[in-house]
Amino acid sequence: MSDVMYSSTRGADLKVKASEAILRGLAPDGGLFVPDHIPHLDKSLEEISALGYKETAYEVMKLLLTDYTEDELKNCIEHAYDSKFDTEEIAPMTQAGGAYYLELYHGATIAFKDMALSILPYLMTTAAKKNNIKNDIVILTATSGDTGKAALAGFADVEGTKIIVFYPKHGVSPIQEKQMVTQKGDNTHVVGIEGNFDDAQTGVKKLFTDNNLAKEMNEKGFQFSSANSINIGRLVPQIVYYVYSYTRLLGEGRIAKGDKVNFVVPTGNFGNILAAYYAKAMGIPVGKLICASNSNKVLFDFFQTGTYDRNRDFVLTSSPSMDILISSNLERLIYHIAGDNAAKDAEYMKELTQNGKYAISDDMKAKLTDFYGNYASEEETAEAIRNLYKETGYVIDTHTAVASSVYSKYVKDTGDKTVTVIASTASPFKFTRSVMNAIDNADESVDDFALADKLSEMAGITIPAAVETIRNAEIRHKTVVETADMEKAVRNFLNI
Ligand SMILES: *Cc1c(COP(=O)(O)O)cnc(C)c1O
């Protein structure tokens, strides 16, 4: 078996092993690490259908993280997918309203980011050992709400690491904010910024690529890494649940051997749907990858026209984790459809930085037939929650509702009857107010926790521990800075 090596989307010179790509997070030229080839699953889908989540995870991850030993990888998997999840299935599926909802929110912070962020700290500390790293790893993360908490929960008190999270002070839900600012662990630091998610992400990227800062940090015994979905160590564990859901359907006889399934993915930074694209490349029979956007529909426009254009107003929606105008992981797709061409990708990304837009070639556009893009307005999103609840009693969150609404549009557009799996990316209890508003106009005077009680009663499900434990928790993080002062905040925390 040949090693999978990783190189930058923007330059072909550097080739590193998986563990090094995970440690670095971002390539030195600002590009993202991509595998030089995508191996095919080496067990049949029938064989995999007999496996549990952890065993499936091993089958997928061993093929892409080839420099980890079997023991190392299994050890990481064991630590990640344990009782932090409230179900042994880890990623159960519920059939409702003509689709399967793949529930990716049974982890510590009740959103799908847990699927990858519960394993990343172990992949990273294992990588540090393998590469003889003596520095403390400083995880620097920009979050639109969910990554931050999931990363904090994953890295809190992990020896040899520190984590700094930047979030848009006015762009996350009250429960998301409370989850973050109550985070325990002396190695954690949470900072609100006076800006939106793109500002936070741009600021973090700038810190990552600041060579002087890196040098100074190294002298003081620190080095940055990233827990953002640009880290290949986030992407690889996300491929697992697409393989798992497909083989579950196969094992349960809901589809036959060779049948295709569609995946609908509520999309922001393009990480989750890219994992589905890789799952297809590894041998999962996929029909369409349906990319669902909210009113920040930059990806919908891209799939329509072949032009990616971030020059537009940023809209705050009820699905804040998808309020994004620069979908970082799209760069990996651009690189692949350009024929793994780093020079071409670098050109497009330069245009994006300079003009806020780029237009791909017709050849590349022709390679996007795997995808279908559409979007849901705020009203359509609420309607999807309301209708599904009224028809089936099943409650979905706002992000999942964007996907659900887009799936209805897709069926209307195409008449396609292929079995379809919708990635359900957050528990409705994470966005309680919007969910309750959609179902029956939530009472303004009632706080989010009282609303959670009401939702629990209505949906007949107990409030997740993640919500209960922050109800009366102490607020430990109060720092808020201007975007321009992000570096200062980092220096303060690290004492450099
Ligand atoms: C992060 C997130 C998304 C978007 O996922 P990407 O991988 O960034 O496209 C969707 N829904 C929820 C709840 C999220 O937390």
Image (cartoon, rainbow, N blue to C red):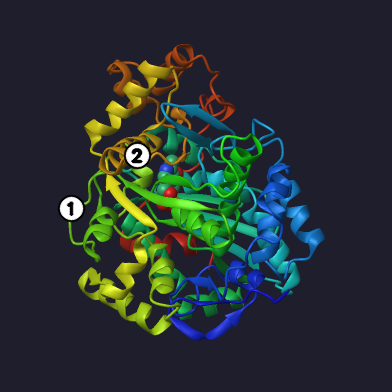
The reply to whether residue 380 is in sight is: yes
Residue located 53% across and 68% down the image: 496
Amino acid tagged 2: Tyr
Image spot of residue 124 (x, y percent):
66, 62
Image depth: mark 2 or mark 1 in front: 2
Image spot of residue 301 (x, y percent):
23, 56
> Residue 207, relative to residue 284: is it above or below?
below
Q: Secondary structure at mark 1?
A: loop
Location of the N terminus by quadrant is bottom right
Q: Within 10 Å of the Cα at label 2, are there few (<14), some (14-19), or many (20+) other Cα atoms?
A: many
* Nearer to us in this view, 3 or 439: 3
* Nearer to us in this view, 258 or 142: 258
The numbered dot on residue 313 is 1
Image spot of residue 189 (x, y percent):
52, 51
The numbered dot on residue 191 is none
Image spot of residue 134 (x, y percent):
71, 72
> Residue 394, relative to residue 12: is it above or below?
above
Residue located 52% across and 24% down the image: 472
How far, Cα to Cα, is label 2 from label 1? 25 Å
Q: Is residue 219 left or right of residue 212?
A: right
The reply to whether residue 158 is in sight is: no
Q: Is mark 1 within 8 Å of ligand 1?
A: no
User: How many discs appear?
Assistant: 2
**Which tag, 2 or 1, sits closer to the chain's start?**
1
Amino acid tagged 1: Asp
Q: Is mark 2 within 8 Å of ligand 1?
A: no
Reading the image, the residue beneath label 2 is 407
Q: Is residue 310 left or right of residue 290?
A: left
Residue located 43% across and 17% down the image: 393
